[in-house]
Image (cartoon, rainbow, N blue to C red):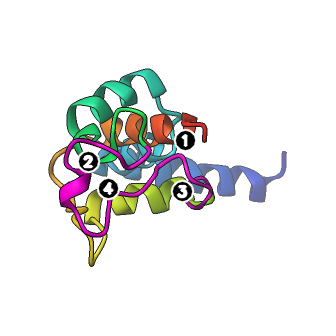
Amino acid sequence: MGRENRVNNLRVFILFLFAMVLGVVPDLLAIHAPGNPEAGKDIFMESCQHCHGPSARGDGQMAEYLDPRPKDLTSASTRSMTDDQIRKVIIEGRKGTAMAGFEDAFEDAQLIDLVAYIRSLKP
């Protein structure tokens, strides 16, 4: 290994340590960590199924009172969304619908699990 490679590796290591001290790396790792769909299902059943329904098809007990009706989370349009897009809808809500934002409702790990559960849904 040449001197230039060692210097570059040292720079990367120092940046990594700096990011760890600031707490950035754990957050980045958590956002891209695989979630636990079973834990996500528990969160969904507690927080989402009232509108989206227990099978996530948009037919929850509150659905008939909402216009537009809640999204069918088993649909092709949901499956085509990226994890980040799904996460954004959960956090920010969806304008023009009853889907409110849940920015402060979930920890990052819970959001990851919730997205993993939504990903596991089949039509």
Q: Earlier in the sequence, mark 3 or mark 2?
A: 2
Query: Which of label 3 and label 2 is nearer to you?
Result: 2
Identify which amino acid the numbered label 4 is placed on: Ile
x, y percentage for residue 42? 31, 24
- 122 or 20: nearer the viewer: 122
Mark 4 surroundings: few (<14), some (14-19) or many (≥20) residues within 10 A: many
> Which portion, as a residue range, is magenta?
57-79
35 w.r.t. 3: above or below: above
Find the distance from the CA under tag 1 to the CA under tag 2.
18 Å
Quickly name the residue at label 3: 78
The verdict on residue 8 being magenta is no
Q: Earlier in the sequence, mark 1 or mark 3?
A: 3
Q: Earlier in the sequence, mark 4 or mark 2?
A: 2
Quickly name the residue at label 4: 90
Q: Earlier in the sequence, mark 4 or mark 3?
A: 3
Identify the main secondary structure in magenta.
loop
- 70 or 41: nearer the viewer: 70
Quickly name the residue at label 2: 51
Query: Which of label 1 and label 2 is nearer to you?
Result: 2
Identify which amino acid the numbered label 3 is placed on: Thr
Left or right relative to 39: residue 29:
right
Mark 2 surroundings: few (<14), some (14-19) or many (≥20) residues within 10 A: many
